[in-house]
Image (spheres, rainbow, N blue to C red):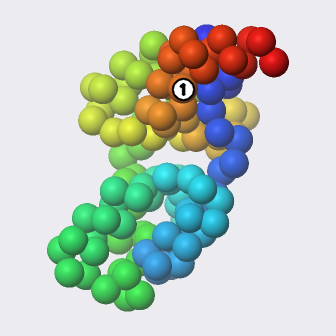
Amino acid sequence: MLVRDAMSTVVLTIGPAHTLRQAARLMAARRVGAAVVLDSDASLGILTERDILNSVGLGQDPDLETAGTHTTTDVVFAAPAWTLEEAAAAMTHGGFRHLIVMDDGGPVGVVSVRDIIRCWTPARRQAATAA
């Protein structure tokens, strides 16, 4: 199975000036665990629910902290044609749970550990094939 088969095509893109509270609201509304942070110079980063949780846990104000301050910019990107095994290996090696999926120079999806597990779980696979 390939990344394109498992990834979410709902890509939430925010700017680095968004506050963590704004980012959390948008992520919750779209039911996603990560947002792609696009800077004015077209560089991409990722902000995850864990980044927001860590900031709040440190006592930082989510109304003052910005996405740009908490964005991971050393991002590993996946291609839609990667296998799920390749994506899982990249996540394991890097110690993260989300990959931005890039195609034609832009983000086309996000694949998470949850997406991979959903595809690898036999009961879910059987239900999807039966439908």
In depth, the one of 128 and 56 nearer the eye is 128
Say which quarter of the image contains residue 131.
Answer: top right
In depth, the one of 94 and 58 nearer the eye is 58
Residue 83 vs 42, above or below: the answer is: above
Q: Residue furthest left?
A: 58
Residue 50 vs 62, above or below: the answer is: above
Mark 1 packing: few (<14 Cα in 10 Å), some, or many (20+)?
A: some
In depth, the one of 124 and 109 nearer the eye is 124
Q: Give how far across and how far down residue 15 sits, in percent.
A: 57, 70
Q: Using residue 106 as the reference point, say whether residue 64 is left or right of it.
A: left
Q: Give how far across and how far down residue 79 sits, in percent.
A: 60, 26
Taking the spot 48% from the left edge, 34% from the top edge, the residue there is 114
Taking the spot 62% from the left edge, 32% from the top edge, the residue there is 7
Taking the spot 28% from the left edge, 74% from the top edge, the residue there is 56
* Position of the N terminus by quadrant: top right
Secondary element type, mark 1: helix
Q: Give how far across and how far down residue 57 sits, in percent.
A: 21, 71
Residue 106 at least partly seen: no
> Which three-letter amino acid code belongs to the residue tagged 1?
Arg
| Residue that mark 1 sits on | 118
